[in-house]
Amino acid sequence: MVDQARARRLAKRISSIVATAIEYEIKDPRLRFVTVTDAKVSGDLREATVYYTVMGETLDIEPDYAAAAAGLEKAKGVLRSKVGAGTGVKFTPTLAFILDKVPDVAREMEELLARARASDDEVAKAAANATHAGDADPYKVERDDES
């Protein structure tokens, strides 16, 4: 059984090495907007999963996920060599790249929250001009029977 703290440290180091290599050393234009978000290492330290996301050039242009995946697949050997040289472990883990959906889910959640805020504002505006359906004081008041 491998120490989980060691696996986390190795995953963090792999994430850092891969991100630095993509940014400064690999000249593939398909990887220009790739950002490494996380890495996980298996319990036996033989397999590493690197999570990445792709940002668009501008907000209105959809990122090219397929090209980024192809670029990472092509650079996998070089990146594994960099990881082996940078970590110094006995066995260099194999790398698998998985597209991280967290930024997309966060963006969708922000849109849902904005719609909920707008709906709340509409309800607040309608409630500002509302009046009670019955009396202002709905509770019965005891009457004095002085007849």
Image: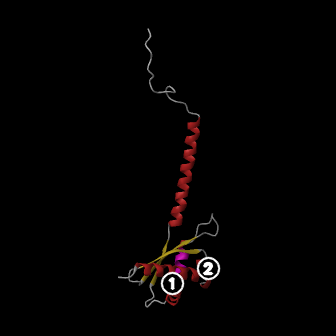
Percent x, y of residue 129: 59, 34
Determine if the magenta segment contains residue 69. Answer: yes
Q: How many marks?
A: 2
Q: Residue at x 60, y 74 (%)?
A: 33
- Amino acid type at circle 2 is Pro
Q: Which residue in the structure is indicated by mark 2? A: 29
- Which tag is nearer the camera, tag 1 or tag 2? 1
- Amino acid type at circle 1 is Lys
Which quarter of the picture shows residue 23? bottom right
- Under circle 2, the secondary element is helix
How packed is label 2: few (under 14 Cα within 10 Å), some, or many (20 or more)? few
Q: Which residue in the structure is indicated by mark 1? A: 76
Magenta segment, prevailing SS (helix, strand or loop): helix
Q: Is residue 51 above or below residue 127?
A: below
Determine if the magenta segment contains residue 131. Answer: no
Which stretch did the figure color magenta? 66-72
Percent x, y of residue 13: 51, 81
Which quarter of the picture shows residue 43? bottom left
Colour basis: secondary structure
Q: Which tag, 1 or 2, sits closer to the chain's start?
A: 2
Q: Residue at x 53, y 80 (%)?
A: 72
- Under circle 1, the secondary element is helix
How packed is label 1: few (under 14 Cα within 10 Å), some, or many (20 or more)? some
Q: Residue at x 62, y 83 (%)?
A: 24
